[in-house]
Amino acid sequence: MKFSHLIVINDPLSPLIEPLTCDQLWQGLVLRAEEPMRFVPHLDQCVLLDRSGDSLQRELRYGTLVVRDEVKFSPRHEVRYEVPAQQDIPASSLTMSIGEPQEGLLVVRFDYEDATPDLANSMDAFYNEFRRSAYQESDIDTIRIIRQLADEGRFDPL
C-alpha cells in the first residue's frame, strides 16, 4: 500500500491560522520521533536504543506488541521512519517532508508505504482504506499538538 497526503501549515490566504516557523515545525517533527508518547495515544513505552548522527533506533511497546524502528533525519527537510519486517509486521515506512511550494505557504507531506497489496475488491483494500483514514487523523493530531506546543513556547529560542 502506498498513501500520501498534505497538511497545510501556513497559508497566506487563511489569516485565522496562526503561522508556524519552519524551525518550530521542524522541532515538532523531531519531538514526535524523540517523545512519541506525546503524539501516539496507545503507545505504552518508547525506549531510545541508540542515537547516532542523524538517526534514532527505537523500541515501541503497545501492550505486548514490541516494534523496533529507525528514524532518520534530514535537518529541516524530512523525518523518515523505517520499520523492518518483524514477527507478523511487514516492512513499512513513513516520510514526513516539509515543503514551501510558494512563499508563505508551508506544508508537510506524509508518505506511507508498506508491502500490503492494494487490490480493489479485496479485504486488504477495505483495511487499507481504514488505515489511510487512521493515518490521516493521526497526522492531523500531530500538527495540532505541534501547534499547541509552539503556542506554549516549547520551540522558542533560548
Image (cartoon, helix red, strand yellow):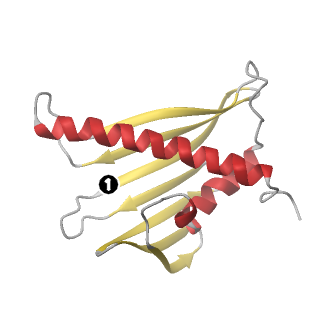
Instruction: Estimate the x, y position of residue 95 in percent, counting from the top left.
Output: 47, 48
- The residue lying at 71 percent from left, 49 percent from top is 148
Q: Residues within 10 Å of mark 1 (few under 14, many from 20)?
A: some
- The residue lying at 42 percent from left, 50 percent from top is 94
In the rendered image, the residue lying farthest to the left is 122
- Quarter residue 75 falls in: bottom right
For residue 95, above or below residue 2: below
Decide which of 142, 4 is in the foreground and name it: 142
Identify the residue under disc 1.
92
- Left/right of residue 128 with respect to residue 142 in the rendered view: left
- Left/right of residue 114 with respect to residue 17 in the rendered view: left
Whether residue 59 appears in this view of the structure is yes
The quarter of the image holding the C terminus is bottom right
For residue 54, above or below residue 11: below
Whether residue 25 appears in this view of the structure is no
For residue 8, above or below residue 36: above
- The residue lying at 87 percent from left, 59 percent from top is 157
Decide which of 130, 75 is in the foreground and name it: 130
In the rendered image, the residue lying farthest to the top is 13
Q: Callout 1, which amino acid?
A: Ser
- The residue lying at 19 percent from left, 70 percent from top is 87
Helix, strand or loop at mark 1? strand
Instruction: Estimate the x, y position of residue 156 in percent, counting from the top left.
Output: 84, 57
Instruction: Estimate the x, y position of residue 24 in percent, counting from the top left.
Output: 74, 50
- Left/right of residue 56 with respect to residue 106 in the rendered view: left
The quarter of the image holding the N terminus is top left
- Quarter residue 83 falls in: bottom left
Instruction: Estimate the x, y position of residue 46 in percent, counting from the top left.
Output: 47, 74
- Quarter residue 124 falls in: top left
Looking at the image, how many numbered discs can be counted on the residues? 1
